[in-house]
Image (spheres, rainbow, N blue to C red):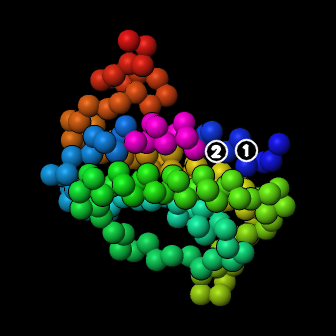
Amino acid sequence: MRITDSFVPEIEQEAAITRRLLERVPEEYFGWRPHPKSMTLGQLALHVAQTPGQVAEIASMETAEAPDFSHPPSAETRGQLLAEFEASVAQAKESLNRWDDATANGIWTITKDGNILMSLPRIAFVRSIGMNHLYHHRGQLSVYLRLLDVALPSIYGPSADESPFG
């Protein structure tokens, strides 16, 4: 069994949860932010939607230059948001399915202006940024939605609005 074989089912399971959250993002609040230092709802939702594919894309390189995060793009419509998410998840699964163990364990490096920011096994980057970072932002997104009084789906168990147990 390849190292990445356990990641693909996790991506699929987590994608179902993330999709339920993204489906509830109200377009009329895409420009809303809970604090002046926060991303807008549209920016955060698009970041959540694009993270799996973007991480897979840069993790497939030997070395990557850190992107500029100072002006994140925003989703324009919920349809765009969901389409971006579906393409992103497909790209992540495709990339991981191509990797053998040597590729997954290969050292991957990210730089900024020629300086090494991080150098670690590719699969560790996928776990840290592709998965854990996504969960972090998905949690932020659920707080944004709660503040906007949007009913939250069940994530890992019942929310105050929905129970997976009936």
> Is residue 137 found left or right of 31 in the rendered image?
right
Magenta stretch: give its range: 11-19
* Badge 1 amino acid: Asp
Residue 122: image x %, image y %? 73, 62
Q: Tell me: residue 109, above or below residue 162.
A: below
* Badge 2 amino acid: Val
Q: Inspect this view and state whether residue 129 appears.
A: no
Secondary structure under tag 2 reads helix
Which of these two is toward me, 2 or 25? 2
Q: Residue furthest left?
A: 28
Q: Which mark is residue 8?
A: 2
Q: How many marks?
A: 2
Residue ID at (33%, 69%): 73
Q: Are marks 1 and 2 in contact (CB under 8 Å)?
A: yes
Residue ID at (73%, 44%): 5
Residue ID at (58%, 44%): 11
Q: Residues within 10 Å of mark 1 (few under 14, many from 20)?
A: some
Residue 55: image x %, image y %? 57, 62
Q: Quadrant of residue 119?
A: bottom right
Residue ID at (36%, 55%): 83
Q: Residue furthest top?
A: 166
* Separation of marks 1 and 2 at Cα, in angstroms: 6 Å
Q: Inspect this view and state whether residue 57 appears.
A: yes
Secondary structure under tag 1 reads helix
Which of these two is toward me, 31 or 103? 103
Q: Which image quadrant: the C terminus?
A: top left
Q: Which mark is residue 5?
A: 1
Q: Tell me: residue 76, above or below residue 110.
A: above
Q: Which image quadrant: the N terminus?
A: top right
Q: Tell me: residue 122, above or below residue 63.
A: above
